[in-house]
Amino acid sequence: MRKPYIINSLEKVFSDEAPGGELQRFSLLKNETYSFQIVLECETDETPVSIGLPALSGGHIALYSAENVPIEMPARVKCRDDFLLRGGEVGEYPDVLRPCGTELILKGKGFHALWIDLVPDAGFSAGERELVFPVRVGGEEFSVCVAANVIDALLEDDGFVCTHWFHSDCLATRYGVEVFSEEYWRIVENYVRCAVQHGINMILTPLFTPPLDTEVGSERPTVQLVDVSRGEDGAWSFGFEKLGRWIDMCLAAGAKYFEMSHFFTQWGAEHAPKIIADGKRVFGWETKARGRNYRGFLTALAAELVPYLKKNGVAEKCFFHVSDEPGLGNLPYYKSNAAFLKKILPGFRFIDAMSDYTFFALRIAETPIPSIAAVDDFAGKVPELWCYYCCGPAGENYINRFIFYPSVRNRALGLAMYRYDCRGFLQWGYNFWNTALSRATVDPYQDTTAGGEFPAGDGFVVYPGDDGAPVPSLRFKVFRDGLTDFHALHTLERLAGREEAEKLVENIRFNEYPRTSTEFLALREKINEEIAKF
């Protein structure tokens, strides 16, 4: 049996291979969560393990056991390049981070990882400290340690906006609860809090059931927050009690912004989303987006929604959508609908994922969100640059968070976004536990590819846990750390100026970044060293 040892958070631990990336010391800022791993080798199928956690003044340590999930062939072949784990082959890959206690049973022979989150609070002080972890594996006792240097500086709150689309219908379906029951609200709040803890500060808010990833002619479970009624005279009226509860819940959980669900269907903006009034569906796939009835409905809604948002002090925190990922063939519909929404919702921000610069050049899109592969077409030309990725770009070593990608390929997003001065990021799948187009549900522990349609892990970064609690993925922790790198660079910018901070990432692109965990973390240590000078 190899003695337990500590490695960095950017190595993924497979049972049949001793991982590298040993970690002896690290630095962090005072309000930064820092992650690393303890590697254990087990010689039996079931090995009892205990670990002692060091006392941490001004913070706490969260402990997780890393578990594997399967990867299937259909998704792997869509993402061919030279920077994959194990060639992206079919197999079991580490991704689930199961919260655990200090006494546990590890199943299976070979190497295992315990994931450590060092979580500070307001009383976390600067200075050097040694973290010692007594470990017992089977009947043998060991001790592992790592040195931490806490720098007397704080991550900069730079106004960056980050969203992963929140699918509350998937929560209701998975846990078998009625939408808007008290149990539903409890579970939704658990998942919102987890999102915020990992850097998501804008929550997709379903004014109406979001018209996303839905097969034409079908529908997803209703999660509409706005109550709608129609009088005998045809006049619309609206109730915002559920919306108000959603907003209050998100703010209490630490969210800062609200991303109102799309007013038109995905990939074309040709139809209305499903809208329920007085218990019946009144708009949907049969509704023409530019029809008089639907536009009259939206006009009536805006007349009441805008004063409500202003009265409750969140109007400036709200972003609106027209339609997701329009192409040039959809330009007439998108242009007409965007102009209409801006007329009835003056002064609000509109954002949409789109990668053709034509939409901005024609002043149709106010804040386009291009794919990271198209960022160069927009950089320096738009007032505020955002970006997104989803199941693509595939190949060419582009950054993404697929399960079979090395973790540096996930974390590098923060460096690249700083290099391009991005002000927002969007990803479509926080907890999408369906097949493509929501034809059926999936168990993400068994199917990581949405029925073989998406690269493994594209649709979610959390797993459904017991009692309505989310189980984070390893990828979500690493994504959070990438955001931390981004904010650390903004801290350096505040202290030394943009030019000094940019020097450290001048060679970074969305498909060019440090390839090894050692090289990557050395760059982050350099950022911290520069911060410490001030």
Image (tube, rainbow, N blue to C red):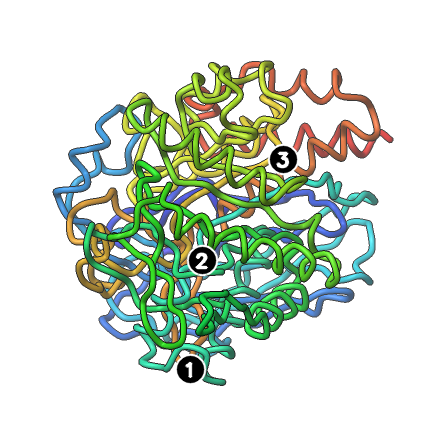
Q: Position of residue 386 (x, y in %)?
A: 55, 31
Instruction: Give the residue pinned by disc 1.
Output: 467
Q: Which quadrant of the view contains residue 394? A: top left
Residue 166 has which mark?
2
Mark 1 and mark 2 in contact? Answer it, CB < 8 Å: no
In front of the other: 19 or 163:
163
Q: Residue furthest right?
A: 534
Seen from this angle, which residue lies furthest bottom?
182
- The disc placed on residue 486 is 3
- Residue 70's spot in the image, x, y percent? 20, 55
Label 2 sits on a secondary structure element that is loop
Q: Where residue 276 sits in the image (x, y, percent)? A: 38, 68
Q: Is residue 251 left or right of residue 473?
A: right
The answer to whether 252 is drawn above or below residue 505 in the figure is below
In the image, 194: left or right of 255? left
* Pointer 2 or 3: first along the chain: 2
- Give me the C-alpha separation between circle 1 and circle 2: 19 Å
Q: Nearer the viewer, residue 42 or 473?
A: 473
Identify residue type, mark 1.
Asp
Q: Amino acid at mark 2?
A: Phe
Q: Residue at x 30, y 51 (%)?
A: 287
Dot 1: element: helix
- Nearer to the camera, 212 or 164: 212
Badge 3: residue crowd in 10 Å (few <14, some 14–19, many ≥20) = many
Image position of 306 with respect to 266: above or below: below
The answer to whether 238 is drawn above or below residue 316 in the figure is below
Amino acid beneath label 3: Phe
Left or right, 317 with reference to 471: right
